[in-house]
Image: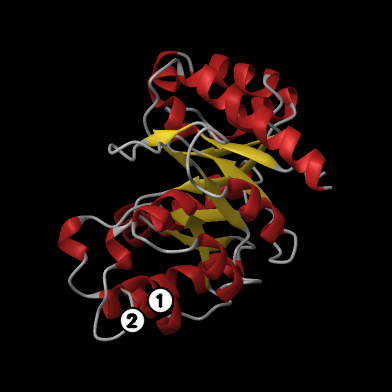
Amino acid sequence: MNNSIAVQLYTLHAECEKDFYGTLERVAGLGFNGVELAGYWGKEAEDLKATLDRLGLKAVSSHVPLERMEENLEAELEYLKAINCNNIVCPYLVEDRRGDYSQLAKSLNEIGKRSQQEGISLSYHNHDFELEKGDSVSHLEQLFADTNSEYVKAELDVYWLTLAGEDPLEWMEKYTGRMPLIHLKDMTTDSDRTFAELGTGGVDIEGVLKKSKETQIQWYVVEQDKCNRSPFESIEISINYLKTTLSKIG
């Protein structure tokens, strides 16, 4: 069984705001062995690293806004090195940056090259708007074509791919070897098509897990942008589903 299961802490952002370290403790108690950060809640890197080590959690990656990477990359890289985190992710493209994907590719190449020099990999995390077609292919395909695969990796999000009418398995095949991380989230089967706990919706999560064996994915990252119950309950349902399914498929 692949036991490299992390949670994206955006799922727990309200809890992190109230008690960041207490939230990390509960995450570890549920059986996660990694976290993907979405902010540092004012914590010094050395203190955060000590807490993660005490809890047996790995800082798998960090979602850092593109603007922060462009404006202050060196400070971001220093923080990540201090907490032994070797993945930095562009999490979201604000609307006024979506008109020029070629310029975005240049910026990501530069950030990715500098990050690699410090032993840190840059990935790009998709939503559904990047799946809109440009001239002949989607913006996301063009972005990955225009970036160096050594400098810019893919953190595919299976929910957003499915919402856009795409097949996550085809995308995983296409970017085999370029995906250190993958976002796992499910989708309700009603007309809302909103976020759901893993194994309770219509996304082929089991197919994704089977496919991941041949695509060199290092970490499964559980994320649920919005939860209809306590987010701790939601991520517990999701990790239990993952563990059971991974054991079943071997």
According to the picture, the residue beneath numbered tag 2 turns out to be 137
| Above/below status of 54 relative to 144 | above
Q: Return the residue nearer the eye: 138 or 191.
A: 191
The answer to whether one can see residue 106 in this image is yes
How packed mark 1 is, by other alpha carbons closer than 10 Å (few <14, some 14-19, many 20 or more), is some
Residue 83, position in %: x, y? 62, 41
Residue at 72% in and 43% down: 4
In the rendering, at what x and y percent does residue 66 appear? 34, 57
> Disc 2 marks which amino acid?
Val
Q: Tell me how many marks there are.
A: 2
**Mark 2 → mark 1, Cα distance in angstroms:** 6 Å
Q: Are marks 2 and 1 in contact (CB under 8 Å)?
A: yes
- Let me know if residue 40 appears in the view: no
Instruction: Name the residue furthest front.
Output: 190
Q: Give the image location of residue 246, x and y in percent.
A: 76, 42
Point out residue 240 in the picture as x, y percentages from the top left corner.
68, 27
Q: Secondary structure at mark 2?
A: loop
- Tell me the residue at 64%/63% (across/down): 119
Image disc number at residue 216? none
Please state if 68 lies on the left or on the right of 19 as rendered: left
Which label number is shown at residue 141?
1
Res 150 quadrant in image: bottom right
